[in-house]
Image: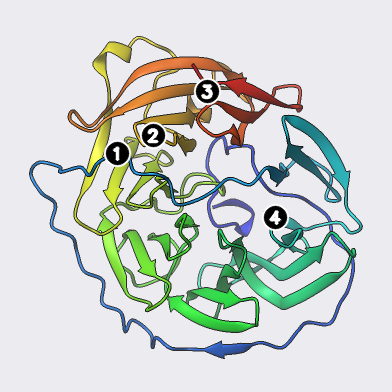
Amino acid sequence: MSDGCEKWFGLAALFLVLITACCTVAPVASKVENEFPIHSATATRAAVPNTPRWEDTSIAPTSQLHSKILWAFYQSSGGQVFVLEEAQASTLDLPVSMGEYYGYNPQTDQILMARDFPDRGAGPAGVSVSDLSILDLENGTLEVLLGDDVVKALWSPDGAAIAYILATDRTYELHWRTTDAVDRILAYDVTFTWSIAPSGGAVAFTRESGYGLDIEAGLYVVDVAFGEERLIADVDNSGTGSVTDRPYWSPDGRELILSHWGGPDEPRLILAMADGSGAFDLALDEALADEWWATIALTGVIWDIDRSHLLTLSTMASREMDGPSPLVYYRLDRDSLELTDGILLGEVDGMIDWAVPGSSVWVLTSARDVAQIALP
């Protein structure tokens, strides 16, 4: 792993890391409640049925996309973000520079970030860490929540809590911190491919070899309320892939997709049930075998709101080194466990988020502009 970071391999997807640092504010004291002693939640291996049984796919999504999105990519200035709203894209100069951008909370108009560039290693594998801070865009103030040792962080979907991974001497801890500074440890020995369920009620994360941890590798889900965790898929990314990789939750929170595309092993695309009732390897429809853009080595996935289609990006399928990547719209055939009916929508440098859910998506063009592409 290069630069002491958690997972660099090959052609990383072009998302989310801003550079430089400044500003100093005293950290705010917090209360940490270790409600779940180390390894107190026993992970259970889900029995995989011979034939998958799928629920009704017409269920309405539990998450809502906000009309305003703030987004940044790693080659942009540490003091600027894109503002995407009402079919318009613009840039916003920030009152401070950022070492790393973690996300935007539209409910409070705040940015979750690292003030300092993560240039120091910590934890058993020496993973890059920095501080955890909140920038209030309305009044321009910066609040430092934790001064150091934070690997990554995310807002909860409702903006009422923050999930973050903290490096200690012996492990990497998954924390859940509410806005009133109550901080709980949800899991230990986590690695850095992770995401929060659309409901905010669970966190998916991997445990991977290569980080100096005594673990059973796999994809796990931990319940936020009670700290109960379960193993939902056998997979070991072994520290390969991209820093932007994550488990991709379906809109209703019932399923996840995890792409294993880095390293020497054959790529895998795994569809796992969030309740642990089954995990299945997806394949590519043989009818697409001759298409240069068709692959299961996906570096980005957005579920369509119907749960039957996927919008995908693959830097591994670019036609030239460091060139744009194919943006492809697939149908997910749960009967055959295949990606089928693929449609190439274009070649882009990044896939951001929905512009209009189910209708159009924000992308980063090869000219480093932000634009919309319509779905068929």
- State yes or no: discs 3 and 1 in contact (Cβ < 8 Å): no
- Amino acid carrying mark 1 in the image: Thr
Q: Closest to the observer: 63 or 74?
A: 63
- As measured in the structure, the alpha-carbon distance from the residue carrying label 2 to the one carrying label 4 is 25 Å
Q: Is 210 placed above or below 49 here?
A: below
- As measured in the structure, the alpha-carbon distance from the residue carrying label 2 to the one carrying label 3 is 19 Å
The tag on residue 327 is 3
The tag on residue 106 is 4
- As measured in the structure, the alpha-carbon distance from the residue carrying label 1 to the one carrying label 2 is 7 Å
Q: Closest to the observer: 102 or 75?
A: 102
- State yes or no: discs 4 and 3 in contact (Cβ < 8 Å): no
240 vs 253, left or right, is right
273 vs 25, left or right, is left
Badge 3: few (under 14), some or many (20 or more) residues near its Cα, within 10 Å? many
Q: Position of residue 45 (x, y in %)?
A: 19, 64
Q: Position of residue 101 (x, y in %)?
A: 71, 55
SS at badge 1: loop
**Can residue 218 be seen by looking at this rendering?**
yes
Query: Reading the chain from its start, which is encountered first: label 4 or label 3?
Result: 4
Q: Closest to the observer: 7 or 196?
A: 196
- Amino acid carrying mark 3 in the image: Leu
Q: Which residue is mark 1?
A: 57
**Can residue 123 be seen by looking at this rendering?**
no
Badge 4: few (under 14), some or many (20 or more) residues near its Cα, within 10 Å? some
Q: Which residue is mark 2?
A: 306
